Image (cartoon, rainbow, N blue to C red):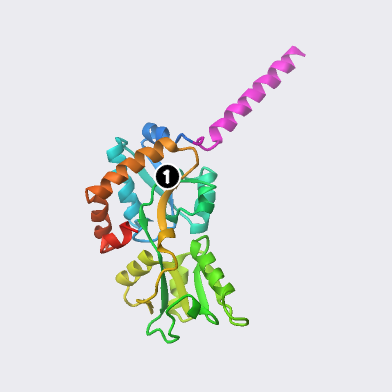
Amino acid sequence: MNYNLKFIAASVLSAAILLTATQPARAGDVLSTISSTHEVTIGTANDAPLSYIDPASKAAIGIFPDILREAFRRMGVKADIHAVAMPFSSLIPSLTSGRIEMIGDSMYATPARQKIIGFTHIIFYNPEALDVVKGNPDHLHSMADLCGHIAGTYEGTAFVDLLRSASAACPSGKSIDIRLYPTLDNVFADLSAGRLDAAVAASSLSAYALKQNPALNFQIVADYKPVNRSKAGSAIGVVKGNEAFLNAFNTAYTGMLTDGTAAAIFSKWGLTPPAFFLHQ
């Protein structure tokens, strides 16, 4: 009887140890974990130039990895950045499940998201762009103009709600036919092929895509006015309870804004003038 009790107790203890070892890091542990392991895993939607994985070296590159590396240096933290590519809609679930330690990509710090995860101060403003087929044959210049047309965006973004709100305001029988895609590349492919009349995407990504590949059959509507630029602030996301990391990072990034380092990073990646992105 005593032997059985000891065996059961040992089994329970072993199971508890195994469960603890396989659980994600507790909230509030990110800074100490990075400092001790000298590495961090970030999630990215793999969209250049904001945050993506170099096909040759497999290194995390882009604006957000550059900002993190410089911030870590100023924080006195030595850490290699490993990136995991995934659809944008998978970023928050991957963070809360412990698959990644940070969202190192452009995500609006909306009130709804702030209830789920923690955010740094705003890194930059990335309002939406209205993208249309070259020549803008349908004469689309505003969200209201999309009524009765086919418009697309990528899943998990604030642009989904933007299109749904615009569609709800359309006249009866002329709602927007909204198409959702797993990635931005899918959106641009269907827009270029004429399967969409328009697309709503981050202005930085639309501009960069056209700069890298002028052959894409779409253009940004130059006179389009973003619905609410003040709500288009992107930040780095972490699990709630990481105030130590957030405070240290925010101090470092404030210094980068002040001394021009942040502006230099944005210029390096072709997002110019940097003031357009860095200031509300």
Q: Residue at x 46, y 77 (%)?
A: 198
Q: Disc 1 designates what residue?
A: 41
Magenta highlight range: 1-27
Q: Quadrant of residue 39?
A: top left
Give percent across and percent down for residue 213: 32, 72
Magenta stretch holds residue 13? yes
Depth check: 193 or 104 in front? Answer: 104
Give percent across and percent down for residue 109: 46, 53
Depth check: 197 or 78 in front? Answer: 197
Q: Residue at x 42, y 87 (%)?
A: 137
Q: Residues within 10 Å of mark 1 (few under 14, many from 20)?
A: many
Q: Amino acid at mark 1?
A: Thr
Give percent across and percent down for residue 132: 42, 78
Q: Is residue 172 above or below residue 35?
A: below
Q: Residue at x 34, y 39 (%)?
A: 79
Q: Quadrant of residue 40?
A: top left
